Amino acid sequence: MRPSPENKNGIKTQDRESTAVLLILAAGVALSCLTLFAGYDILPDYQDKLVHLRRIAALSDTLKSGYFPARIYFVMNEGTGYAMPVFYPDIFLYIPSLLYGLGVPLTVTYDIYVVLMNVTTATVTYFSVKAFTGGRRIVSSVAAFIYLLSVYRLTDVYIRDAAGEYTAMAFLPFAIYGFWNVYTSGSGRDEHGEGSAERSGDIFHSGCILGLGMFLLLSSHILTTLMTVMLMGLCAVICIRKTLEKRIFLSLLVSVFVFALLSAFILVPMLDYMMADDYLVDVSSSVMRGFYPGWRELLELIPGGSGSGIAYELRMPTAVGASVTAVLLAWAFYKAAELAVCIKAGRTKEFFSEKTVTGILFFVFTGITLFVSSKYFPWTYIESRQDALTKIFCSVQFSWRYIGIATALSVFIGAALLAEVSDRKNSFGRALCVLLIILSVIPGAVLQLRASEENRRAFITYGEEIGIVSDELYFPVSWNRDADYERVPESYGSVSVNGFGISDHKWKVSVSAGDEGGMLIFPLVSYKGYAAEGPSGNRLEILSTPDGRAAAVIPAGFSGEISLRFIEPYYWRLSELISPAAFVLAAVFLCRGRSKAQKHIRRK
């Protein structure tokens, strides 16, 4: 049967819309990679790119040695080891580390990662906003375009090189959508009168979406996850009556359960280490660093600041960007005008629809996050308290981290505004889309070109060229950071070392002990998990020396070879089985829910 003229027009319209969506998203990704096109060897001073290059090289070394997943970067700090993966998840860095292992130059692997994250950001934002707006494809692609070229995100990518933070920003829209979905999934029909699995009251479906979103955040950046949880908790308290509704409350519980299962392989080792010892990160979490932006820095239209040394001494670009500022102003004026019309017509109650209340909440929380990120928030007072409040707030280290969340929230506000304007006057909606795209391109291009011009260049092929060293956050407080330990085991007491060898970060030491016994001290940071065995496979006790090194207790009269290696506790291994199993189950459940939704829509 030939399609009717109406169907033909409908198919042509869909094809044009699909083409427009692909063009907008492709243009956004390409424009967000301007700095890479200008020079992939850009190396900002005093920023994090060297840290992440070293992480990639160290992760590759650990994987080559047969340790999977990586829990210790054995090659770091002159081979004394560093448990950074336990405290700073590196699951997404496995991609560049595998490329590095195949011989790809180190700086190239990092830039491939940047491109992949730009593509991921565009994809995740598009589909999250599309679900939020009830299937508005053009609106969703414009929202993704704005987010890709937002000033703070590009600052993270090309000036700060904050790999964990801009990876988290890729998944932040999905987490925000998941939280919104929990509170609105029982509405039955969306604004177009169509049903969906997300709006069917399916407790497990909405809980799985939020749990998965928070897991992706945790896998990227712990601090972004912490900030997001705090803001979600505040929103849950503000909306306490709705929060305590049975369906919503159970969905939130399901999300916590799903998140815990998915994140078990991250949370179990991290909590185990935190309970086993004290680390320098606990000390630094009570101190705020860097500058605090004012309203001018937050809302400037063209990004200012320098691209060199800006985190600690000079100001860096911290604006949300011209497009985001325009979105906030346009939404506020549009809703104010709509409210005035409703009041004049005596239909005030009609103004407070579900989508308007959602917009108000998003707008308020955008304001809260910008306020918290600024110098107007009482950071100095909170830091001076040195109590639990200090630990909670100051653990973020830099106040302007909250700008990332403000940007993501603003994107949803802009999408809601574009959808509503397009419904009432399509031509004006198109004009607003074009204007927001232009306001995104200009500051985004200025920032990237400035970053490519102001920073030095260094093409790095191997990790050895920059030294496989680390920061100090995740050392035990007992570790002597000033000592320069030789790569030899030391004997203590009546123990003598007759010879030793190292292969794939596994030590074999031939020792003999007199009547008193003693200790064999290894030039390794004493992290939980190191195990020493005698010739017959008997385990030897491992202690931590006063300067934080790992030491094996050698019994009196012992003679033979001792082997020492890192062995994960059995409950770590168990968590590594639980997480992928939970991920598969969650994926199957979500796919089934989507299939049911599509069948429901077709029936309608």
Image: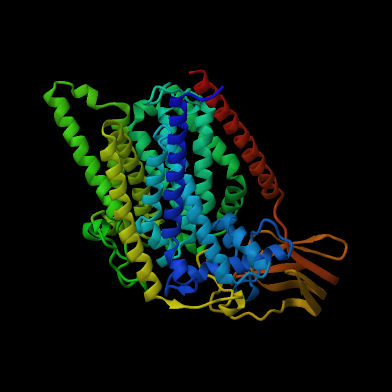
In the foreground, 408 or 437: 437
Q: Position of residue 91 (x, y in %)?
A: 59, 55
> Is residue 450 shown to the viewer in this render?
yes
Name the residue at 50% across, 78% down.
Answer: 458
Count of marks overlaid on the render: 0
Left or right relative to 173: residue 500: right
In the foreground, 425 or 392: 425
Left or right relative to 19: residue 330: left
Q: Quadrant of the N terminus?
A: top right
Furthest toward the left, the residue is: 344
Position of residue 62 relative to residue 411, above or below, is below
Position of residue 315 relative to residue 436, above or below, is below
Position of residue 470 relative to residue 440, above or below, is below
Quarter of the image where one finds residue 177? top left
Furthest toward the top, the residue is: 603
In the foreground, 66 or 15: 15
Question: How is this picture coloured?
Answer: rainbow
Q: Position of residue 87 (x, y in %)?
A: 55, 57
Quarter of the image where one finds residue 182? top left
Name the residue at 76% across, 66% down.
Answer: 564
Quarter of the image where one finds residue 442? bottom left
In the foreground, 325 or 4: 4
> Is residue 476 shown to the viewer in this render?
no
Q: Position of residue 459 (x, y in %)?
A: 53, 77
Name the residue at 56% across, 78% down.
Answer: 466
Q: Position of residue 107 (x, y in %)?
A: 55, 71
